[in-house]
Every structure is written in structure tokens, then in C-alpha cells.
Image: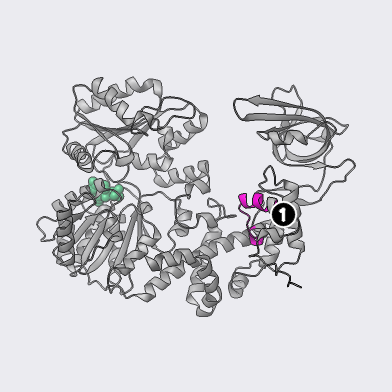
Amino acid sequence: MAEAKKIDLKSDIKFMKGVGPKRAASLQKLGISTIGDLASYYPRAYEDRSCVTAIGDLTPDDENSIYTAIGVIVNIKEKLFGRNRSILMATISDGTGYLQVNWFNQRFLKKSLVIGKRILVYGKIGYAYGGRGMLAVTRLISFEQLEPGEAIPQQGILPVYQATESINQRYIRRLTENLLESGIEIEEIIPESIRKKYNLMPRRSAVCSIHYPKNNDELAKARDSLAFEELYIIQCGLLLLKKDSQQEVDGIRHLMSGSLVKSVVNSLPFSLTEDQANVWHDIERDMERNIPMRRLLEGDVGSGKTVIALLALVKTVENGYQGAFMAPTEILARQHFAKFTEMLKDKKIRVGLLVGSLTAKNRRETLERIAGHELDIVIGTHAVIQENVRFDRLGLAVTDEQHRFGISQRAALDKKGEHAPDVLVMTATPIPRTMTLTVYGDLDVSRIEHLPPGRQPIRTFVRENDRRQLIYEFVKKEIEAGRQAYVVCPLIEESEASDENRCHVPSAEEVYAELSQGIFRNIPIGLVHGRLKKDEKQQVMDDFYADKLKLLVATTVIEVGVDVPNASIMVIENADRFGLAQLHQLRGRIGRGPYSSYCILVAGSKSPLSRERLEVLRDTSSGFEVAEADLRLRGAGQFFGTMQHGAGDLKIVNVMKDTDILLRARQAAIETMADEKTLESIRPYLTDKYKDRFSQINDA
Ligand code: ADP
Ligand code: MG
């Protein structure tokens, strides 16, 4: 007889009782491939079924008006809208009154929801829309179809799962119930000592209670324990990564800053702000230690991060090392190159540029000069670390606008010499404070909170499309007063994409044509976008820097870092097509000089939600507030969709609210790293979980 397959959390879901191949496929679509996935398929809500209320006793629209009611369907009809929208409307009755129940876009239910069927509904009760006092479930949290005469199926607080056509609520409930009753072992992940100290529930109880809590207190405690677990694992992963990378290699011990650094500080046209001075102090201290620096410098756009990078690079040069400065785009790399060359011109520091568009010969020469230490500072795109660039002695690598650089690129720098160079990562990606630790937990963090003095605030306006004429007349006046302006468009050319609502979205090329032939026909204006050849792009940018072009029609190629202090106006066409954080980045291109600055967001859509989003920008100039609003309006999944760390692992954590848990989990992870025994008990789990990420780093 074949040995029975041992069922554990790693087993395929198809070994679960009641799951055939077809169901297994449907479950997989919900992200449930293993039994463990089912255990962590946490409910999205709960239904308190401790009491069923007679329809005649339902009280609509009070704050706590969430009820369970049972009735028989006495009437059902379907309304269709457009291509694929529908409402299924049922009226149910239990003899004490009538209640309307609506299902949106779930036409498949029509087969089973028929007159005479008994159903149980759980949701918020209000008045039916246009129903003259008729009661309705205004937010249906869950529902269940009952057999005739069947008693209330389950009592107490029930889980409400994300369900689908083929996997209904009742079915998932049965699966989770079977799973938890099966006595399957749910092993602890968090080391015993940490669990005790932080007062966490045993993992098995937490998992049971998150699905079937006895009461709200138990639910809250289970949720906290599991959220702690998620955050603790991520924190341990990040800290372990940091620990291993710092242990493997020696860092470079830079000397205290000397005359070269001081002379550069003295030649700046301004003095450092207090924030900048503090940050610079953190960096000097890191660089002077033997442990490789891994520091994140956060600061809103325009807060003055570049000068900090410059000083750090000069410091490494002063110590006889080379520095690399990586920008996310070629435009930016060239801009930094021009600035640094200018600022360092009397200092005998040799600055070079390494970007994709160099001629083969030029590139070869530059590579030779890097290898031969004829260049002290190399500015480029990420090609500087990705390709086979050999430095003679790399002492510091700075990456600007970190969101384009992943953790594996960060780690690739460890391989650049026998001593690991110091790494400074700079970002203006406004990440809510609470999330910095989750995404950049392997880095130490410094922040520039306040902008340099003397900035004029940027005034932001939200305007409808029909005001464009007036907007551009205003832009023209400002240009006549000596300023420059940007016009940003979401698309390059007309055919690129058509809007879902079939509204016309003017492209950069069209807007350029319209403006250059119309209101700005006597004013030199330019067009720049990603499809131009590199040298064409550069020419346009150079002309704009030199004030030869007064207005620049652009796509988001100008999003990061472009610094033209005389540009004081930005018009963003179809602003609702951009993310909030992106709009904030774009807006950061203006307000860099002493002039009053204006950002005009032209709303392409009239929807209230898109208006609300744009008004966030009108009402705050803080990148962090923008990020928090963006997160709130879009949800964490989308917000972190492109980030490499953490996002997919957060199933239960509420990134906006769980700051306290995050800080405790971080603390616990720090303690774990400090204690060999505790660390060894969780290391195998972490290595297994993060093996892709770790190996990516080891291969890099
Ligand atoms: P970001 O943080 O976006 O990279 P930058 O480094 O480009 O910001 O700085 C924006 C502008 O502020 C630059 O023109 C820079 O010269 C100027 N700046 C930086 N630090 C100071 C300071 N301490 N006082 C006045 N102006 C400053
Ligand atoms: Mg910058």
C-alpha cells in the first residue's frame, strides 16, 4: 500500500478534502496554491452573526446599522447598463417587512437567486435609492443561500473572504473550517524568546482566531500578532542582508575631512542649512568608519541633496579614492556633470561622464581613464555599475533618485573592489514615514526636512479643460516678464493610446503644434520626449537651460532632477492621468528660483475622485503628505506594486495604521540579529523565504 501523503502547510491545495482539480485551479486564481496559502488567506471582513434581526426591526442609516437578516426572495429583476454593467435587484421578506438587496455586475448569480429562495444577508442598512422609504442593504458585506427550513448555518463572528463566481463564501468557509479542525500543525516562525517578550499569540491560535474569532478582543489580538509576524519577517530579512553584506567585506576608513572638502564647502554660493549640515555630519561619520556606509538620504524635491552628494564625493577623492554618481536618466547625468564640472573647476578634481550615447571611441577612452584613475568622479546612468566598468579604487557610490535602483543594484556595489565602497542612496520618492523601514530597512536613514530658505512657495491650481486659453495667456505674460515655462503632456503622439471614455487626450506633439502655431508663434518653444534621439534631446535641453527656449513642451522625461531656476510655471495637461507622487515630482521642477511659481493642473476628466486627487496637490506642498494621500486613495497594492521589497508580503498589515507594530517588530528584529542563538533559529526560514533575493544579490 502506498504511504499516505503527509499533509503539511507546503502541500498542494488539491490534497485538501473537497478540492478537486477544477476547484484547485479556481483557488489558484485567488492566490491559494498550497494549504499554507489557505491558512493565510485572511478574511477581508467579518460578519457578526450573533443575532438575526427581523426586517421590521431594522434601523436604517445609523452608524452601527450593520445587520444580519433572513428572508425569502419575493421579487427579482435585472437591469443592464452598457456593455458589461448590471444590477440584480431582489426584494426579500420575512413576514415583518420588505428589504431590497442589490448585486452589482454579478450576472452569474441570476441562475440561483430565484423567487422562493431563502437567503441570509449581512450588511449596512439604509433606504433604497428612489425607493420611497423602502429599506435596502446599501453595502452588502456577505450573503448566503439557505435551504428551505435550514437554521442559521453558523453563529458568532464569521470570516468574510474575497470570493469569486466559482469559489463562493460558503465554500471557502468550509475549507478554512476543515483546515483548522484537521489539527494540521502550524509551526511557529518567530523565535520563542521574541514571542514571549512581545506577548504574541501562539501562531496556531492566531491563525485560528483570525479566521474564527470568539469575540472582538481575540480578533484584535490575533490580528496584531500576525501583523507583527509579517513585519518582523521583512525586517529580519532586510537586517540579515545588511549584516551579511557588512560582515563579508571590510569598508573603507576615510579620514576626517580636510582642506579639499573645506574649500569646496567655502566655495558654495550658500551655506548649508541646519538639516543639510546634520545630514552631512551623519555621512562623514559613516565614511570615517571601517564598516561600509549604507545610508539613505531622503529629502523632498528641491531640498538640496545634490550638494551633499558633491561633498561626499569630494571627501572620497580627498582620500585618494574615486567616486561614482549615478542618475536615473541621461539628461540628469549630463546636468549633474555640467554642474559638478563648474563647481569643481579650480579644485584639480577630474570629473568624467559615462552615458549610453557616447561614441564607441569616447566610451573606450572614458573606461580606460576610469581604470587608470585619471578620473576622480564619474557621473553617469546606472550603466556605471551594471556594466563591466572597472574602477582603480572606488570609494563611494551615490545613486540619485533611488526608486529606479533596486536592492540588487545596491548590493552589486559590494563587488566593485576588495574593499566595499560606501553607498549613499538619495531619494525624493515620497514614501510615508511608516514605510521607509519596510522598503529601505537595510539602510540607515537621514532626512532633510526643510527646504533651503528664500524659496517662493509654488501655488498650485486645478482647472478644467475649457480654461486652457486663459491659462496660456497667463503663461505668455510670465514669459514676457522673463520667466520660462514647462507644459507637460501624458502622451508623446496622437495614436499612442485612446482614453477609455474616448475623450481626446492631446499628445505632446499636438500641444506643441497647437502652441507653436498659435499663441506662442513669436516665442521660441521646444519639444522634448523619450523618442527623440539622445543628441536631439540634449540639444533641446541645452537650449532651455541657456534660456534660448522660453517654453518647453515635454513628457515625463523631465520628471526627475532637471534644475532650471528661471522656470517658474508648469502647466500639466490631463493631469489626472498621472500618479500623485509623479505630479509632485514634476511640480518640483519649478519653484527653484526667487520667483513666484505656478503649477496649473488641467483636469481632463470631471470625475469627483480625480478632482479630489488633484486637490491634494493644491492643498499641500509636502511630498510626504502627498504620498500618504496617494496611498490612501490608491491602496497599498498599487502604491508598492513597483517596489522590490515588502509589498507582496503584507497581507494583513495596514501600512497607514500599523506604525506601532512596525516599530516593535523592527526592534524585535534588531534584537534577533544581536543574539546568535535567536538568529540561528530563524535564519533557515529567512534564507528559504528570501532565497531569490539573496541569490540575486550573490549573482549580481
Ligand atoms: P534635490 O534635493 O531635488 O536634488 P537640489 O540639490 O537640486 O535638490 O537643490 C535644489 C536647488 O537648491 C539647487 O539650485 C541648489 O543649488 C539649491 N540649494 C541647495 N542647498 C541650498 C542652500 N543651503 N541654500 C540655498 N540654496 C540651496
Ligand atoms: Mg536631485
Task: Identify the residue at image location x=72%, y=54%.
Answer: 20
Residue 36 magenta-highlighted: yes
Question: Which quadrant holds residue 95?
Answer: top right
Task: Identify the residue at image location x=45%, y=57%.
Answer: 439
Amino acid, disc 1: Gly
Label 1 secondary element:
loop
Dominant secondary structure, magenta: helix
* Residue denoted by label 1: 20
273 w.r.t. 542: above or below: below
Residue at the far right in the pictured view: 149
Residue segment shown in magenta: 23-37
Question: Which quadrant holds residue 650?
Answer: bottom right
Residue 417 magenta-highlighted: no
Where residue 531 sits in the image (x, y, percent)? Answer: 29, 38
Q: Is residue 416 left or right of residue 430?
A: left
Task: Identify the residue at image location x=50%, y=67%.
Answer: 236
Where residue 636 sits in the image (x, y, percent)? Answer: 52, 48
What's the colour scheme? one colour
Residue at the far front in the pictured view: 1
661 w.r.t. 132: above or below: below
Q: Is residue 652 left or right of residue 385?
A: right
Where residue 293 sits in the image (x, y, percent)? Answer: 33, 67
